[in-house]
Image (spheres, rainbow, N blue to C red):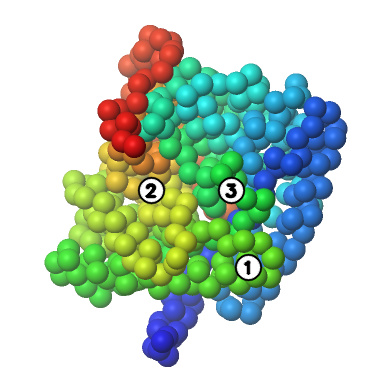
């Protein structure tokens, strides 16, 4: 039974503590659209998306108004595009079609201009990956992702090298917007098929024709809850976060089921990740600092983040029968006001952020680096992060922005939820000979579990 006090507590979270549903994401399969005729393929894709998602934005707005729960974004994810573009020569036309469909449906983003190359690359995979800079420079709402490694397969170092080059090219192709294209491009290890968050959302091959998933948020809610246990032992901190995550996830479960019913589409998952925004009071860094750190990045930060991530998962999993996606705590530097300030003060280095990714939901996220960073250095960053994911059987990712014309200490702005970030230094030691070896880093021994 839900008590009146619990309802009032949830309303307080919404009104004063920035609790929101970060996204309703409709996943749509494009496998039925395949054609060896480019125009027919694009027409099939456009018709499928606009038919399926025709009412997505309206339903989201109706639920937001009727339930009083802010829903920040309405999004679409589709089958990894490389799986449906094998018979055509120019996948960029599919990118443009996806963007056109996003505009027609009124969503904020569409994800799935993606390739899964953790073991090897098909010709279609390579064509799509090489087209990413042009695709992201010619579109407004499209997001792209590439999976270069997994615990079962190892790390495809040829794909890692290629992605280092693609990120540099994407930054150059979107120079006029500060390299914004790179903010819509993420490189994964152990990518999941039901992630509702951009830029890494795609509708995996194991999914059905359509699904509705929800990503909740609420760092501000957790921060306020921890203010009530200031100075108390970590056992109480963990319990407080678990109870709060339960409330947050129940809101997501309610919205997801209602959206599923109204859209006549199966309920996918609730992703209970704490996703921050640049707004003051909506920060994962602030939660860590509330635990007693002077600033995010101080010694103890990784331990605090590990506690937070674990408690969020434990509390959320009790609140929904279908928890999935990434579920935990995100640390996107440009999207978190506390992270921005910590990076500006020098408390957060690339190395410290890498250590934190061992225990959080994803990885090196929305980090601005000098625009002249070599492609091989970017590839080395990707390889290091993929190794953390591979060895620890977790999802890791890299979304870095080599900001054109910017150097350490400069600031680069992306706007909206993408925020802004100070450019932080990277090691200038040469990784080129390592990266150009190519081949595959073998999977760890524990990948043989069966």
- Residue 70 visible, this orientation: no
Q: Which residue is mark 2?
A: 361
Q: Tell me: residue 200, above or below residue 146.
A: below
The structure residue drawn at horizontal position 57% and vertical position 78%, both measured from the top left corner, is 68
The structure residue drawn at horizontal position 47% and vertical position 57%, both measured from the top left corner, is 271
The structure residue drawn at horizontal position 67% and vertical position 46%, both measured from the top left corner, is 29
Secondary structure under the numbered disc 3 in the rendered image: loop
Q: Which mark is residue 259?
A: 1
Q: Which residue is mark 3?
A: 207
Spatial separation of the CA atoms under disc 1 and disc 2: 25 Å
Instruction: Quadrant for the C terminus, please.
Output: top left
Q: Earlier in the sequence, mark 1 or mark 2?
A: 1
Question: Tag count in the figure?
Answer: 3
Nearer to us: label 3 or label 1: 3
Left or right: residue 418 compared with residue 26: left
Picture quadrant of residue 294:
bottom left
The structure residue drawn at horizontal position 54% and vertical position 31%, both measured from the top left corner, is 116
């Amino acid at each position: 039974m839900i008590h009146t006090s619990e309802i009032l507590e949830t309303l307080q979270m919404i009104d004063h503590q920035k609790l929101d549903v970060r996204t309703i994401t409709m996943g749509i399969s494009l496998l039925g659209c395949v054609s060896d005729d480019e125009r027919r393929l694009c027409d099939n894709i456009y018709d499928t998306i606009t038919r399926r998602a025709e009412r997505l934005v309206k339903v989201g707005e109706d639920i937001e108004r009727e339930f009083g729960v802010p829903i920040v974004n309405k999004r679409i994810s589709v089958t990894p595009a490389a799986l449906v573009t094998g018979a055509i020569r120019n996948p960029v036309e599919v990118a443009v079609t996806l963007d056109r469909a996003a505009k027609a449906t009124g969503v904020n983003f569409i994800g799935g201009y993606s390739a899964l190359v953790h073991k090897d690359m098909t010709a279609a995979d390579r064509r799509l990956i090489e087209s990413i800079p042009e695709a992201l420079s010619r579109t407004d709402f499209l997001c792209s992702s590439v999976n270069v490694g997994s615990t079962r397969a190892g790390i495809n170092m040829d794909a890692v090298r290629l992605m280092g080059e693609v990120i540099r090219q994407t930054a150059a192709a979107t120079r006029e917007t500060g390299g914004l294209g790179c903010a819509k491009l993420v490189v994964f290890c152990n990518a999941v098929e039901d992630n509702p968050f951009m830029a890494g959302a795609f509708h995996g091959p194991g999914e059905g024709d359509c699904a509705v998933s929800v990503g909740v948020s609420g760092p501000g809610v957790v921060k306020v809850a921890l203010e009530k246990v200031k100075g108390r032992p970590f056992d109480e901190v963990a319990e407080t976060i678990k109870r709060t995550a339960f409330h947050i996830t129940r809101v997501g479960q309610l919205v997801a089921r209602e959206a599923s019913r109204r859209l006549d589409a199966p309920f996918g998952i609730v992703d209970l990740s704490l996703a921050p925004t640049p707004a003051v009071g909506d920060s994962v860094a602030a939660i860590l600092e509330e635990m007693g750190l002077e600033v995010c990045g101080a010694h103890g930060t990784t331990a605090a983040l590990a506690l937070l991530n674990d408690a969020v998962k434990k509390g959320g999993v009790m609140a929904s029968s279908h928890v999935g996606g990434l579920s935990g705590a995100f640390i996107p530097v440009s999207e978190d006001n506390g992270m921005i300030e910590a990076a500006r003060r020098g408390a957060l280095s690339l190395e410290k952020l890498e250590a934190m990714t061992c225990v959080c939901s994803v990885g090196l996220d929305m980090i601005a680096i000098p625009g002249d960073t070599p492609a091989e250095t970017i590839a080395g960053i990707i390889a290091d992060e993929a190794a953390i994911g591979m060895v620890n059987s977790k999802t890791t990712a890299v979304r870095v922005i080599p900001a054109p014309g910017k150097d350490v200490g400069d600031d680069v702005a992306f706007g909206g939820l993408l925020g802004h970030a100070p450019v932080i230094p990277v090691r200038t030691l040469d990784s080129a000979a390592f990266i150009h070896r190519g081949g595959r880093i073998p999977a760890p021994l524990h990948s043989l579990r069966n």
